[in-house]
Amino acid sequence: MTSRHTAAGQAAQTPALTIDALGRKCPIPIIMLAEQINHVPLNAVVAVLADDPAAFTDIPAWCRLKSHHHVGSHELPQGGWSIHVRRNY
Amino acid sequence: MAYFDAASTEPLHPQAREALITALDAGWADPARLYGPARRARMLLEQARAEVAEVLGCRPDEVSFTASGTQAVHLGVLGAARGRRRAGRRLVVSAVEHSSVLHAAQVHERDGGSVETVGVGRTGVVDLAAFGAAVRGEGAGDRAGATGGGNAADGRGEGGGDAGGTALACLQTANHEVGTLQPVAEAAALCAEAGVPLLVDAAQTAGRMPLPGGWSVLAASAHKWGGPAGVGVLAVRKGTRWRGPLPEDERERRRVPGFENVPAIVAAAAALRAAAAGSEREGARLAALVDRIRAEVPRLVPDVEVIGEPAARAPHIVTFSCLYVEGEALLAELDKAGFSVSSGSSCTASTLRPSHVLEAMGVLTHGNVRVSLPRGTSTADVDRFLAVLPDIVRRIRAEAGVRS
């Protein structure tokens, strides 16, 4: 499985909040994200750390369904990904 | 009890049961021998072959019976790739093929061939332009949407060269998990232009829909159309190069090793004829029930994604994913309520990975339910499903602490 990297030209934005969902199975990382995204200001970025392979597909899909922005996903050295989501509303 | 998992296996058709019981007595002898009972078994076998060929739209001598649909795919992919070894070693597949195709592709790759996987759009339709380019050997492994890969070194060469050519392309008629129809006729035309054979995996539509033309190799599975388990069909068009990957055996025109299961083959042919004869009417009826589920589920259940092509789809399959719901819990609750369905969610898979089909489409993989309606599904069963689903989803979400 390769990682989907940040779209070219998009300036990296420091996450305002990091959710540690490592070791948690889907849908828990997404439930955590849905609960906590409202804790950051508009246009801020939330990073979800997850290693369930379903999260890699499902967090971008959640962003599409919920009209938030999937900024990018980066592989973590210890396995899993840091998946960045920008709060749109 | 409502059985909604026809895409895994269709219950035995009554005409198949009848044919099976008769053929157990009449068709047990070795069809390769020369005495009376053997001649009778051979006659039954050849009659079944002719009937299957007629439904598939090919010649009887192009049809071989295998031990399963999976075996038909394995022999089809590896045999066609070997037969075209001198033309090239590239195998082109869509990202959403059945695992039997992808596993055969892995073997091809281990044997030194290359595999190019062509991506699909959000509804699961293969990227036809990318498929054509992959078949022609243009920019292998370099395209957005192509996943997996193959030997990068092999992809650098251009089409037409000795080792750089495409041996075989593979495309399903309809996806087994989401029901999306693939543009097989268009893909066949692209393959024909490039002089590349196309293997069509017709497992989900044989007996349910007319088969598209233009294929060189076709694979299907009898238990998916209401025949018994243990019978697959491998059809290889005249003029298609094919070289068996297994030790040689005189059975089934040297394509499939082992003693034919004549009674099961006879029953498979009876089921195929019966299914195909009723498919126009029954397909339309099931498609209307599927349309109803597609329309009602997102109305009745909040935060649901209905997956797959809305119109160009197999008549019997509908798939959706429920946000914040664990697929395994959903299956268990539906089972308790009397519904047999399947799921592409990772927690329901032995590998603990989400379905490669849902991943390739980029859709929600958790909380996934595949409903696939067998022949004869009643409107009342679908109504009951739609009545119990909202509360089941609400309960699972509440237990997980999701506020709705």
Image (cartoon, coloured by chain):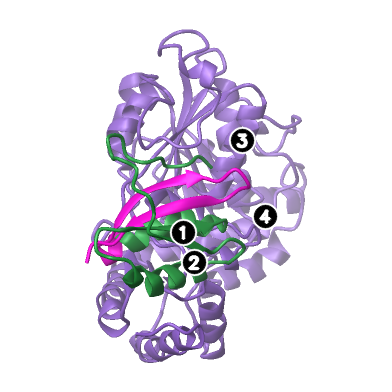
Q: Nearer the viewer, mark 1 or mark 3?
A: 1
Q: Nearer the viewer, residue B69 or B96?
A: B96
Q: Position of residue B241 (x, y in %)?
A: 53, 22
Q: Looking at the rendered structure, which numbered label has been put on residue A29?
A: 2
Residue drawn at (42%, 65%), measured in percent from left and top? B275
Identify the residue position indicated by label 4 in the image. B262
* Mark 2 and mark 3 on one chain: no
Q: Nearer the viewer, residue B280 or B294?
A: B294
Determine contact: label 2, label 1, CB under 8 Å.
Answer: yes
Residue drawn at (32%, 82%), measured in percent from left and top? B301
Determine contact: label 1, label 4, CB under 8 Å.
Answer: no
Left or right of B258 on screen, residue B60:
left
Identify the residue position indicated by label 3 in the image. B106
Three-letter code, disc 3: Gln
Label 3, residues with CA under 10 Å away: few <14, some 14-19, many ≥20: some
Chain B's shade in the image?
A: purple
Up the image or down, B111 lies above or below A33; here it is above
